[in-house]
Image (tube, rainbow, N blue to C red):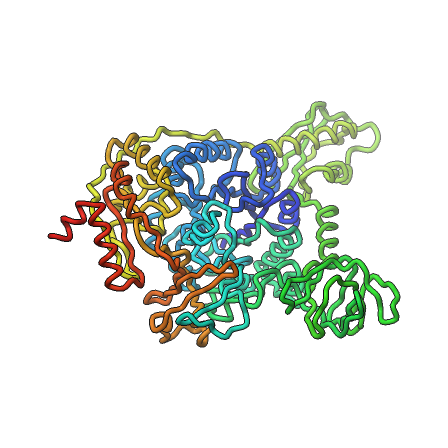
Amino acid sequence: MNSLEILAPVGSPATLEAALQAGCDAIYCALPTFGARAYADNFTLEQMKEVIHRCHSLHVKVHVTMNTLLFEDEIEAAYQQAKQLYEIGVDALIVQDLGLIHLLHERLPGLCLHASTQLSITRPDQIEQCKKLGIQRVVLARECTKEQIQACIQTGIEVEVFVQGAICISYSGQCLFSSLVYGRSGNRGLCAQPCRMPYRLYKEGEPVDFQEPYLLSPKDLSLIEEVQTLQNMGVCSVKIEGRMKNREYVYKSVELVKKARDGFLLDQKDRKELKAAFNRGFTKGHFGQKRGRELMNMAAGNHQGISIGKVLSQRKDRIQIKLTETLHQNDGIRIAGLKEDFGCHVNYIYDASGKLVSQGTAGQKIWIPVSSKVKIGSSILKTVDSQLQKQVDQIIQDQKRKLSMQCHLSCQGPGHPLICQLSDGSVQVSCESEVPAQQAQKRPLAKEDLIKQFSRTQDTFVQVDGFTFDLQGEIFFPLSALNHLRKQAVDLLYQEKIKVQPIEEKPYHVACTSLPLEGIQIQEGLSRPCQELADLRYNVTNSYALACLLTLGYRGAMISLECSFEQTKALIEAFEKRYQTSAPVSVWIYGKRRLMLMNHCVVNTVCKDGKREKCALCHQHRFTLKGKDGKIYRLLGDAKCHMGIFESQAYDAIDKIAQYRHIGVCHFHVFFLDEGPEKRAEICRRIALCDRTFLLNLNG
């Protein structure tokens, strides 16, 4: 069985070193554009080249995320960026946009493509479609159960699974909340994280008595102790979320995943350090069939750290704490339970007698300065562990990761060169000395002498862990010749490790034919739209994405709700120009747009037991969420208890029907969620006034 790949998040040079020293097998990172973490300290193209060289020299793969949706005016720039990454040796691109996948598959067939988790892949039939697009690996949705993962593995494709880090409560790639409400698209790397905001639940317009406000905030996923199970199932790569997180988190996460993969059990210290690095509480998520409170942390949406004690008293600008864990100077703390979040770095610690000390230990009472009024009995959470920071910094500074090598040295005797062969098991190079061996006049060159000289690789990326020899006669070489040969061999090995194969670029020759797509489709409630029409889950934002879906057998596609009128127009014009046929698209003109689709039920968790069995509360009563900004959202689940969050007021573009027809749109989508008969009739009358085709359909 091949060893399970550990895939580490890298959002900066500091976290790159943390990931490498902890023992990752691959990293994923991004350039400043087209990556779903726009606020990470992403790499420039030149920096990315250096990252790839460094990683490849250590036999570590580099996957680059280009997993945002692309509008028509971005697709060519994205293609050129992908081509540049291919030219400098990237191992794989992680992509969401179907148009970019389609274009890369057709034009750069040798480029390895991974389907992003943003594609919400949970089923084998989705994977079969991915195979047609040249996808070599799928990053499964975090909603997958153990059984679903196994079914996906059976398709024969490479399967990658998240095992540590944040969970999006919405199915990834199907969240429009941040985009439509706050103007910051999560599908384009700018998520405002509305799931981490506080809300109040209302039933029939009355607030539900529930004290915890973070109703959409899940705990962090932690499947580290399931890593061997995943490996035995056939998962090829386990992924750690966190390109926005710090080096301690990256280091500890990789270190502990590696420990678990190698068959060692995590101890209490491991778990405590992982929590201190970052946690919102841990859950085994949908893999472990966790629901309700086992999945959610509704008390808080931020880093929880670890509990280290309680407030005993307050005296002016100091509080007294009874510690249950050690607190060091320069640690960061947060006081839980306050209406306004309060946290600080601990610059000063005083013991019970008022003496300034550098730390307090479990069982001890200490005093620390604060700038706010604090409630007696409040819990103290350590959110920054200064000792863990120092530990990781020291490891990064002192323990440089090396490539393990075997060295074979041979010489046929005096007058012949010394030949050095270096091999890491996958790459082998051979160099010979520039000067021949001399006949030894005194002490001949011994194996111990050669081991000493060829082990001097401290300032390089290699470490020689084994030697073999084939030496004839009593030979001698000057030390300078041995050192020069060693450097030559190491340099040649480095060049071989970073060598990039020439790429193959093909012209784009795809013919698309389309059948007429006309009429107005009315969707009642939560039933699925027309089976032949690729719906909003496919996020069609460019002409290549539409062409991709047509090649997969769909009759047309609904344009993403993130597309403006002008972007829709650009898509249609580009499609018609390239394929010489009309663009079979549908546009949403009326309805309460779904902002999120969750495999979690807020209503059942707050009002019942969280198990989501024989509930139907959301259909028996009208439930809404209200944010701190006063905005209200409708909650309604489908037959499988997938909870949708909808706008409370319908999006209305009926008056734009004529404009859309003018640019070539002939099919429109109307969605009725909870509108009564009178409202539905009113909407139909308005559409009929704007669109004669609909009037004819009504009369017919």
Q: Position of residue 136 (x, y in %)?
A: 42, 45
**Viewer-side residue, 97 vs 602:** 602
Looking at the image, residue 79 sits to the left or right of residue 17; the answer is left
Position in image of residue 103 (x %, y %): 38, 36
Horizontal side of residue 533 vs 163, given as left or right: left
The image shows residue 144, relative to residue 409, as above or below, that is below
Classify 7 as above or below 101: below
Give coordinates of residue 179: x percent, y percent: 45, 49
Rendering quarter of residue 409: top right
Q: In the rendered image, is residue 564 in sight?
A: yes
Q: Name the residue furthest left.
A: 700
Q: Position of residue 510 (x, y in %)?
A: 29, 34
Residue at 72% x, 59% y: name it.
Answer: 344
Question: At 71% across and 52% down in the image, what residue appears?
Answer: 392
Q: Residue at x 65, y 67 (%)?
A: 338
Q: Nearer the viewer, residue 302 or 696?
A: 696
Image quadrant where residue 490 sits: top right
Judging depth in this view, the residue of 413 and 200 nearest the camera is: 200
Whether residue 159 is visible here, answered yes or no, is no
